[in-house]
Image (tube, grey):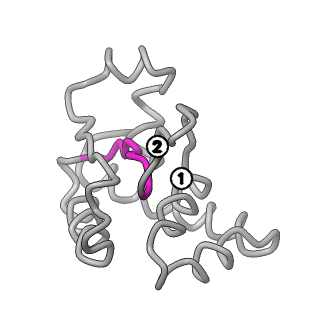
């Protein structure tokens, strides 16, 4: 019999200070349930990502998770899964999944990440 949420793997860019802050904020908000999430720094783990079916270049640009059913989800889908795990943030997860909001948010997210990676000289 399962008790509580199952662990999910969150693949994040540990060399990105904003990504680390986001992880810390998530853990703070999650409180006691934070052990249900395993954070995996993708820095220097290109081969491991490929074995999971994750393109390392995309992993830098999009959040990826492996959920309880062993599915790999990325970008907005990954955020929605994470937000659903924190009661306070469930409404936000519903909002970002709305058909009008989702593509706009996705585009904005990609623009911001591309700018950050160019600024850090980690992509062209």
**In-front residue for pair 22/3:** 3
- Element at badge 2? strand
Q: Is residue 49 above or below residue 116?
A: above
Q: Looking at the image, can residue 102 be seen?
A: yes
Q: Residue at x 82, y 69 (%)?
A: 99
Residue 64 disc label: 2
Return the residue nearer the eye: 110 or 52: 52
Residue in the image at 47% along x and 38% along y: 66
Query: Residue shown at 32%/15% (left/top)?
Result: 47
Q: At numbered mark 1, what does the secondary structure look like: helix, strand or loop?
A: helix
Along the line of sight, which residue is nearer the eye, 55 or 124? 55
Q: Where are the magenta residues, as a range?
A: 4-13
**Residue 98: x and y, percent?**
76, 72
Q: Which mark is residue 78?
A: 1
**Real-space CA distance between mark 2 and mark 1, rounded to the nearest whole angstrom:** 6 Å
Is residue 114 at least partly visible in the picture? Answer: no
Q: Which label sits on residue 25? A: none
Going from N to C along the chain, the mark reached first, 2 or 1, is: 2
Marks 2,1: beta carbons within 8 A: yes
Q: Position of residue 85 (x, y in %)?
A: 47, 66
């Amino acid at each position: 019999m399962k008790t509580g949420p199952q662990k999910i793997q969150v693949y994040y860019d540990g060399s990105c200070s904003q990504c680390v802050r986001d992880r810390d904020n998530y853990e703070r908000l999650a409180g006691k349930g934070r052990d249900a999430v395993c954070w995996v720094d993708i820095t220097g783990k290109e081969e491991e990502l490929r074995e999971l079916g994750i393109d390392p270049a995309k992993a830098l640009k999009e959040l990826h998770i492996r959920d309880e059913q062993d599915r790999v989800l990325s970008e907005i889908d990954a955020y929605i899964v994470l937000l659903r795990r924190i009661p306070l943030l469930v409404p936000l997860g519903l909002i970002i999944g709305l058909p009008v909001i989702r593509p706009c948010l996705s585009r904005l997210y990609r623009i911001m990440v591309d700018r950050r990676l160019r600024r850090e000289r980690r992509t062209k």
